[in-house]
Image (cartoon, rainbow, N blue to C red):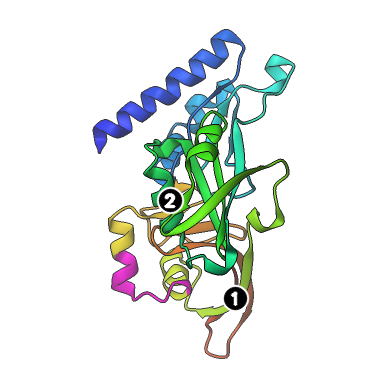
Amino acid sequence: MTEQVELLKKRFAELAAQSHGTNSYTFTGFLGEAESAVYYQMERELAYAGVTVFGGRAEASRNMIRFGSQEEFGYVEEFPIRCICIEPLHQKFADALSHRDFLGAVMNLGIERSEVGDIVVQDKKAYLFASEKMTPYICENLDKVKHTNVRCLVTEELPKEAQVHTENMVLQVSSERVDAVASKVFRLSRSEILDYFRTRKVFVNGRLCENNSYYLKEADTVSVRGYGKFRFSGVLSLSRKGKQNVLIEKYV
């Protein structure tokens, strides 16, 4: 694990130096939360190169990093990301397909995980964010997900269905500590949520969080690997027993 982290740090440093030295933009592939957390450890060190994080839609879980800035170069180069709509050829006979089904079908094409971003499943179709260079290959070769025949269409504009959606929840918690709030949101016991901190599976604002007593601030975003993601929107009121009624925006 340490070796992988060091290799990733080296890669980030190389891309930043290349961008700065050649006055041209450089990009990573799509990064998962653990990989993004490594970048955030180096954020100050790499700031000289000008950094933007984006995954094809606002608040994506998997993102690319772009090194370079318009202020330095005088032009903007867009992220090499495309959105592919994967839909059944015959809706009536389609299976009920999950995120895992779509991801498995794409990975079975022999594609690296870094070429694939978020997958948003809506009913029996999905919106897949992929690297620009792999998009034609995916569209030409992905014709079946599980037992369902599908077709792939590149969308020129981001469909509403592929954007981030949240649902509001009002929960009563003992404090604004991240472990107290996260355990309530995902219905986990205290010992269960602490295990997720110990195994480095909790992230706050994209950064690895190992301090379970961290007090959440308004607009903090929390994700627990395997359970999901939510935004802490602040304390609404206090109960008669002194507990806090908090507003949560849970990603769906």
Identify the residue at horizontal 55%, vertical 39% (top origin). Answer: 139
> In which quadrant is the C terminus drawn?
bottom right
Three-letter amino acid code at the position of disc 2: Leu
What residue range appears in magenta?
Answer: 185-194
> Where does residue 34 sit, x and y in percent of width and height?
39, 44
Relative to 216, is 247 on the left or the right? right
**Residue 208 is covered by the magenta coloring:** no
Q: Secondary structure at mark 1?
A: strand
Counting labels gives 2
Q: Secondary structure at mark 2?
A: helix
Residue 240 position (above or below residue 138): below
Question: In the figure, residue 234 lies in which quadrant?
Answer: bottom right
Q: Which residue is mark 1?
A: 169
Whether label 1 touches label 2, CB < 8 Å: no
Dominant SS type (magenta)? helix
Specify the farthest residue to the top. 22
Three-letter amino acid code at the position of disc 1: Met
Front: mark 1 or 2: 2
Identify the residue at horizontal 71%, vertical 40% (top origin). Answer: 156
> Where does residue 152 sit, x and y in percent of width and height?
58, 46
Q: Earlier in the sequence, mark 1 or mark 2?
A: 2
Q: How packed is label 1: few (under 14 Cα within 10 Å), some, or many (20 or more)?
A: some
